[in-house]
């Protein structure tokens, strides 16, 4: 058998290479390559940098505000008229509007707390067997914040009365950090009109991680306080009195702002009409009860203008008058058509103004 010839291996010391001459490409044709290092600016920020994303989001709201300046001016005029009306009116008007707005917001978020149940809970901490104590607590908080309290833009944690639990997980983001992120965005939007800034805060609420508990009530109350932050009489801007269409979260920022402005204008008109009725009733009731002696009648009139619905135990606790005096005045006012009973039953009756 004839052995195979050994394979021929070229020596690595003396490689055989075919050298192909490549023509040099002009630098102008190498557009896809980065430029020389010395041509790059020295003041570029380090990566990662999330600031452009926030600025881009706020730019959309700035453009929306500029595109709907006429609508914004009209809504601001309505809110300004309501602010002036409340500044010249009694303190009870603010409380009454806060109760109505909180009750309407409760239907928007799904709690469905009526004015009668809310009035009993706020005044006497009374609730029914089937009432949700958590829902009542949320709506009660809304009434307190719509009636006064700290500014949300100054300290959101204090405004919401929310703190991190002691057993917070290591991977969980603290609420203070999420609140700080939201306040940082609001500070960047300081040049926006308060009404636009309120709309922005409401729709960026979940983006900042503040909606994890599913509580849209907090977002709405915070936005209503921001919208009226420059007011003298109105503590909040009504959002739900004329329907909650302005709180619907869908569409581009321009569409959301349009719904917000239209909804706020309708709510302000509803509040103004309500105050017109209250003022007319107060004038008529004062003339009708001028012949009555004692302090019960004036105190009862003030309670009836401050609360949408009043029961005899409520009136007794708020006026500090005797049960007999309260019952006697209620019957007298009902007989003259100043108030009307709304339950239609013999016990646990409630009255409201007959306007």
Image (cartoon, rainbow, N blue to C red):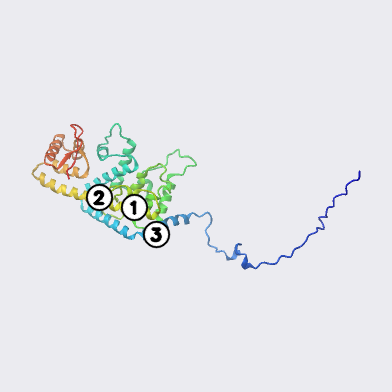
Q: Give me the C-alpha separation between circle 3 and circle 2.
A: 29 Å
Q: Is residue 181 left or right of residue 34?
A: left
Name the secondary structure under disc 1.
Answer: helix
Labels 1 and 2: the sequence-earlier one: 1
Quadrant assignment for the C terminus: top left
In the image, is residue 342 above or below residue 31? above
- Marking on residue 63: 3
Tell me the residue that label 2 is attached to: 270
Labels 3 and 1: the sequence-earlier one: 3
Q: Give me the C-alpha separation between circle 1 and circle 2.
A: 16 Å
Q: Give me the C-alpha separation between circle 3 and circle 1.
A: 16 Å
Label 1 near label 3: C-beta < 8 Å? no
Residue 231 image offset from top left, x and y in percent: 28, 55
Tell me the residue that label 1 is attached to: 259
Q: Quadrant of residue 337?
A: top left
Q: Residues within 10 Å of mark 3 (few under 14, many from 20)?
A: few
> What is the total number of numbered labels drawn onto the structure image?
3
Tell which of 319 and 14 is nearer to you: 14
Residue at screen point 29% across, 44% down:
104
Residue at screen point 49% across, 54% down:
50
Q: Could one spot residue 335 in this view of the protein?
A: yes
Tell which of 265 and 299 is nearer to you: 265
Q: For the view shown, which residue lies furthest in the front direction?
A: 1
Residue 45 image offset from top left, x and y in percent: 52, 58
């Amino acid at each position: 058998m004839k052995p195979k010839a050994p394979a021929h291996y070229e020596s690595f010391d003396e490689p055989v290479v075919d050298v192909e001459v490549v023509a040099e490409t002009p630098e102008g044709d190498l557009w896809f390559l980065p430029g020389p290092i010395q041509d790059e600016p020295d003041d570029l920020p380090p990566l990662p940098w999330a600031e452009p994303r926030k600025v881009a989001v706020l730019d959309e709201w700035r453009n929306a505000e500029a595109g709907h300046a006429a609508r914004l001016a009209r809504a601001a005029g309505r809110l300004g008229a309501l602010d002036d009306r409340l500044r010249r009116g009694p303190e009870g008007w603010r409380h009454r509007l806060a109760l109505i707005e909180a009750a309407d917001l409760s239907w928007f978020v799904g709690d469905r707390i009526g004015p009668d149940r809310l009035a009993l809970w706020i005044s006497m901490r009374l609730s029914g067997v089937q009432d949700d104590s958590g829902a009542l607590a949320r709506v009660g908080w809304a009434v307190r914040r719509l009636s006064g309290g700290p500014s949300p833009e100054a300290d959101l944690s204090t405004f919401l009365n929310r703190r991190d639990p002691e057993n917070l997980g290591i991977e969980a983001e603290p609420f203070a950090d999420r609140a700080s992120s939201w306040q940082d965005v609001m500070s960047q939007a300081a040049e926006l009109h308060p009404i636009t800034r309120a709309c922005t805060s409401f729709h960026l609420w979940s983006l900042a991680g503040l909606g994890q508990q599913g509580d849209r009530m907090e977002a709405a109350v915070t936005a209503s306080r921001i919208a009226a932050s420059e007011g003298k009489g109105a503590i909040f801007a009504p959002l739900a009195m004329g329907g909650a269409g302005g709180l619907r979260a869908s569409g581009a920022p321009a569409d959301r702002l349009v719904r917000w402005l239209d909804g706020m204008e309708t709510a302000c008109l509803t509040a103004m009409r309500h105050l017109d009725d209250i003022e007319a009733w107060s004038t008529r009731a004062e003339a009708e009860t001028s012949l009555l002696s004692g302090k019960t009648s004036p105190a009862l009139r003030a309670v009836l203008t401050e609360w949408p619905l009043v029961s005899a135990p409520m009136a007794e606790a708020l006026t500090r008058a005797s049960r007999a005096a309260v019952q006697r005045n209620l019957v007298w006012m009902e007989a003259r058509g100043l108030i009307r009973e709304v339950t239609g039953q013999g016990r646990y009756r409630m009255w409201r103004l007959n306007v």
